[in-house]
Image (tube, helix red, strand yellow):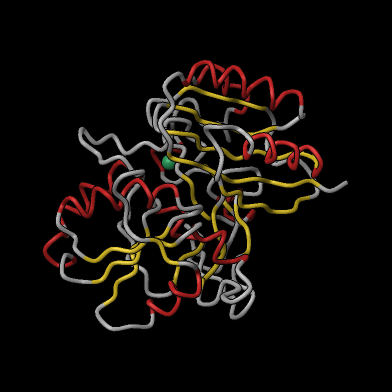
Amino acid sequence: MTYNILLYYKFVTINDPETLVQEHQALCDALNLRGRIFIGQEGINGTVSGLVDDTNAYQKALREHPIFAGITFKVDEASAHAFKKMHVRNKKEIVRLELDEAPDPTILTAPSLKPKAFYEMMQQDNVVILDTRNQYEYDIGRFKGAINPGIENFRELPIWLKAHQDELKDKTILTYCTGGIRCEKLTGWMMEQGFKDVYQLDGGIITYGQDAQTAGIDWEGQCYVFDERLNVPINQVNPSIVGRDFFDGTPCERFINCANPECNRKMLCSVENEIKHQGSCSEACRNHPHNRYIHPNNEKTAH
Ligand SMILES: [Zn+2]
């Protein structure tokens, strides 16, 4: 059986998110979808998996909904569900940036470039490519030559940008993220802060990989995704592997989480090195009393 995995978002004012959360949970349950959806006053952000007919019915329902009309879906084929359960949650922010005064993305956001235009802009002088994602996402794949802010969490990015404003503010900045939502929220704030020439990749990396003209050219490695697949291929033109094993630096595209539940660091690691280092990123993590690798039965007490 064929499944689809949907990735989608829309910034739109929602006056009563809680009612929509309930409606949405019922809709998704009726369609046997699994995944996670955030709904809040600023809009909707979701990723779900289901049988093709069910995900088609879901897309139709959203497109016909007065609030969600015009929403764009990124669709991937799969052979199974990509999530274990269905969660619909009411969130203050559908993507957490935690700024006191972030502009409304429906009013202010950087111009977006379709994949081909983005690719062409990347080739020009005085252009920098900014990866707005986290370190572990960058680790397994990124655009050739992209700047890596090295953040562990999206909300650290404004702080990083403030610290690097002088060197970046007069450049043309191309931002990208997985599906587009982070850039759509961030770039309006960047423009307010005085970054003059900012563009975002329309539909994110996933769209860039599916686009017939770009077919993912010059994307290095894989793209990290927030479902059970963990990463997906993007580049159909000149693919390469950039992921490196945390322990020995050899090419690697396999993620594990550090076995210390309080660290939980995502790292690329071969099966051999996972065994050798007992799934732990450091001596301290290995010796943690709740280490899941060494004390697998302790996991429940660890939280
Ligand atoms: Zn650790």
Residue 1 is left or right of residue 266, and the answer is: right
Q: Hey, which residue is sitting farthest left in the picture?
A: 166
Q: Is residue 133 left or right of residue 232?
A: left
Residue plotted at (62% across, 79% down) = 237
Q: Is residue 6 above or below residue 249?
A: above
- Relative to 22, 183 lies left or right: left
Residue 245: percent from left, percent from top = 51, 61
Residue 56's place in the image compared with 25, above or below, is below
Quarter location, residue 107: top left
* Residue 286, percent from left and from top: 46, 38
Q: Which quarter of the figure has residue 60?
A: top right
Ligand 1 appears in which quadrant?
top left
Q: Quadrant of residue 135?
A: bottom left
Closer to the camera, 143 or 261? 143
**Residue 226 image point, x, y percent:** 56, 44
Q: Residue at x 53, y 48 (%)?
A: 277
User: Residue 267 at x, y = what percent?
Assistant: 49, 51
The residue lying at 61 percent from left, 43 percent from top is 227
Q: Residue at x 26, y 41 (%)?
A: 103
Which residue occupies the foreground of this view, 276 or 73? Answer: 73
